[in-house]
Amino acid sequence: MGDPFGHTPLPAHGQPPAQVLDELARLKADDRDWRSGRVFSLVYSAGEEHHHLLEQALAMYAAENGLNVLAFPSIGRLQHDLVRNTASLLGADDPASGGGVEGYLTSGGSESLVQATKVARDVARERGIARPSVVAATSAHAAFTKGADYFDLELRRVPVGPDFRADPAAMEAAVDESTILLVGSAPAYPTGVVDPIEELAAVARRHDVLLHVDACMGGYLLPFLARLGRFDAPFDFRVDGVTSMSADLHKYGYAAKGVSVALYRTHELARHQVFVTTDWDGGFYASTTVAGSKPAGPIAAAWAATMHLGLDGYLRLTAEAHDAALALRRGIEGIDGLVVRGDPPATVLAFGAADPATLDIFAVGDALAGRGWYLDRQSGPDSLHATVHAGSAASVGDLVADLGEVVAEVGSRRAADRSTTYGSDT
Ligand SMILES: Cc1ncc(COP(=O)(O)O)c(C=O)c1O
């Protein structure tokens, strides 16, 4: 069996811990070094002291099983704190929310979106819809496609507007009697723009359908940007028509991987995320996630992250990340030949060639990778993508400097290729 990663066979005799750890360190040596601040994706870092705290909390709960909070009541308490506090950040304490927001932890953003899709499928069944549909912009996360695939819903992808945001009129045109769920993103991953949630909510209300606001990125970002006076668009449960939301602790909550929150405006909706059965020989079985047995370490680490940072810590990290994102954006806009996609208000952005005929943005990505930078790539249109977090703030100046050099190199190579191919007037 071919294996691109190589293979370590199960040893015939167990190895001492030090040897195993040495080998792990050796295997890890080729991984991206996120501590360098050059990784603008996948990892969110709030510094060494914070990271050490996460490691300790993970270790404290390495053996416990989050499946059963009767056996481990502390895990129940940690979950409750995280869900309640996230709900508060997203407007649940405001009378406009209706006062009934409830939710559950999940393993990550994708599971939160998949669960929201499953809840919508259950509501559609109650309404007698044979094959329900979901209407989402092309910018909505791929996990909606996954959820629709898992639960056999029809996903209608609607092109974004010229500003890369969901287009409420086009989305409304895609709604019909089979539709159960609309999707808005705050912000959307591909370009970091925030969809017009109030307008989408008006569409949802007009057609009596659910509206999920995917704040996986923004749940621990936009509320703090708003408090800092840097963001003011309504996007949470204070908007009439928003029926569910997701917010990832393992992104801008600066937690360890494995924790997101799925929230629902009412108990009636939230209960659909709970799976209960007695239909086997093992007795009463209930769970709120896809996983049965589940790691408690990430839950403890997320709780530790939120308690250690507190409101003032999140405001500080958000300001640092946002200042860095603004600096990156200014830097990109100052480089001839590059454009930022749309008007991203937070800390996620994408940029590409102003004229793809004269600059190959993926060649720019290759050259940046050669200098040790890690940025995601995407198409529609071809772009590089940066998730700016507190841990990447210090390197933004270097990134902009390298980007300027690399764009000049790649651009002049392309110009030289063109003159060789087509001849030149000079
Ligand atoms: C807006 C948005 N939603 C959902 C997700 C999925 O999150 P996860 O990778 O934790 O499953 C992401 C991931 O980047 C995201 O940006």
Image (spheres, rainbow, N blue to C red):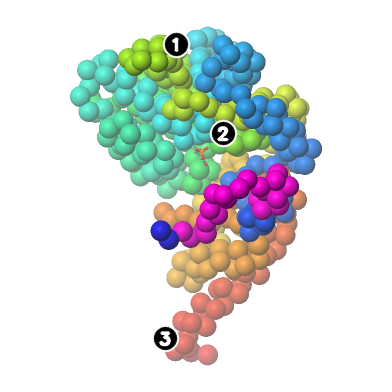
Pointer 2 or 3: first along the chain: 2
Indicate if the residue with disc 2 has its beta carbon within 8 Å of ligand 1: no
Please tell me which residue is depicted at 43% across the width and 27% down the height of the picture. 290
- Quarter occupied by residue 171: top left
Dot label at residue 258: 2
Q: Is residue 2 left or right of residue 70?
A: left
Residue 26 percent coordinates (x, y): 67, 56
Height in image: 419 above or below 187?
below
| Residue 252 in magenta stretch | no
Residue 133 percent coordinates (x, y): 28, 30
Residue with the mark numbered 3: 422
Please tell me which residue is depicted at 43% across the width and 61% down the height of the picture. 2
Height in image: 73 above or below 116?
above
Q: Which residues fall within the magenta stretch?
A: 3-25
Specify the principal SS of the magenta part: loop
Mark 2 neighbour density, 10 Å: few (under 14) some (14–19) many (20 or more): many
Please tell me whether mark 3 sits on a helix, a strand or a loop: helix
Residue with the mark numbered 1: 267
